[in-house]
Image (tube, helix red, strand yellow):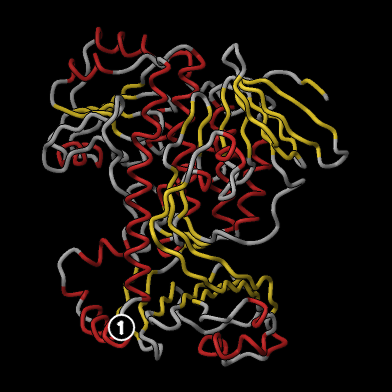
Amino acid sequence: MTREASPPVVIVGAGPTGTTAATLLAQFGVGCLLLDRWSAVYPQPRAVHLDDEIYRVLARLGIADEFAAISRPAHGLRLLDPALRVLAEFRRDTALSVNGYPQANMFDQPDLETLLRTNLKRYPSVEVRGDAEVTSIAERSDGRIRVTYVDRADDSLHTVDTDYVLGCDGANSVVREQISVRMHDLKFDQRWLVIDAATETDLGQWDGVHQVCDPVRAGTFMRIGPARYRWEFRLLPGETADGFRTIEALRPLIAPWTSNIADDEIELIRVTEYTFRARIAGRWRRGNVFLLGDAAHLTPPFIGQGLGAGLRDAVNLAWKLAGVIAGDLPQSALDSYEQERKPHARSMIRLALAVGWAMTAGGDFGNAVRRLFVTRMRLIPGLRKKIVGSRTPALHRSAFVRPTHVPGQLPGTLCPNPVGLDGRRLDEILGNGFAVVTVTPPTDAQRCDLDARGAEVHVAAHDSVLADWLRSGHAAAAIIRPDRSVMCAGRDLQKLCELVPNFRHSRIRSHA
């Protein structure tokens, strides 16, 4: 057995969630060991969508331009009846959102993971080891955590001691099993066929997401890239993916979208079966071991938030962990991770369940109700914006989210990310520590105090996007957290300044 050096953090799982967490920690100067059971990026496509809030996270990682080159904005949503007649169409505004990026973005997950892994090489404080099968996670008598893993390349056994472990190892999480956490079933299990295909022939379809609302054979069609497409169909009892391994077998399902091309013009990339489930971990932490991503929550893909939920976990926890390790924040700061993220994840899962049941429930009666309701949805004020909008719920109250109970309250929501006069977006202007955004210029003493705490100050012009945003929340100033969520907001700048946590030693100094 080989005993290894002791990094402050070990991350198990080098998918998007684990790689994002490692990158963020490295940006804060925290070294980590990233272990993954695969030798390289997992080659099969899985997630295909992320929203503008998550795009904003990618920009923080430093790969916004690279992601733009491998992704395409989705144009909206079209709801179809079982005969594939259009019930309703919801087009997205092509303008950038308040977060600074398109609201919905389609991509191929292996391409994204390759970007994340390549970007991680800029940070020498992160060591990535593939072919590493974690077998044990145990707390030592001195409070540290011993991680044991097998190098699958030569079957050698290794141990490493660390202060914190992040379990980003997916639905079948070894970390979750090791800390004896159970998943709570939210009572949704459906078997679906997932088809990824490529063709150089344009299918001539509307360039948005097609949702087939059918209690017998619900389905989804979407264009992923210039030559990439995905179909998802609910499997009937007795059917398996093995019955759909060829284009000929798939023709009855995909014919409405592929009638203009021959079988030999379509390349099947993957045909597989997934069981869409809704589950959430009973707790997301034991001691200094944390669960993130699919290890903590599973959602059906009906609103495309599975991958995004994991990245939200990473960006929420990383700055808190970095602050605790640096000594800026108390150990209790880590309690806010589950307090904030678990209700948010549960809310998004419930929304996905509602969409799933709306697509699949009710038999003939359900079809009649959908036809009656969906065709009139456009007449309901504000509903279109909610359907195609990407804003997610506010974070739950915690030590770092202090609601004010006023109309349009800001705490727990993301601040806007407008372009400044110098051409930079607000995220870049503020850096990655705490910040105060205000329409009231602070006094010299207030500026000095905020600088001592490591917080940036941004004075918004009275006719600016930020000033309008503050007014919408009945505030003159807001404390912005490192993850760009609002901690608190109000009219008394002095009181707000006193609430800004010390984060001086954890601020990002550079990106490499």
Position above or below: 315 against 455: below
Q: Identify the residue at image location x=73%, y=47%.
A: 38
Q: How many marks?
A: 1
| Relative image position of residue 354 (x, y in whole percent) | 32, 64
Q: Quadrant of the N terminus?
A: top right
Inspect this view and state whether residue 489 appears: yes
**Left or right of residue 446, residue 203 in this image:** right
Position above or below: 179 against 383: above
Q: Identify the residue at image location x=39%, y=60%.
A: 187
**Left or right of residue 201, residue 333 in this image:** left
Position above or below: 98 against 156: below
**Left or right of residue 304, residue 127 in this image:** right
Which residue was labeled with disc 1? 87
| Relative image position of residue 364 (x, y in whole percent) | 30, 88
Q: Identify the residue at image location x=52%, y=48%.
A: 294
Most foreground residue, 130 or 315: 130
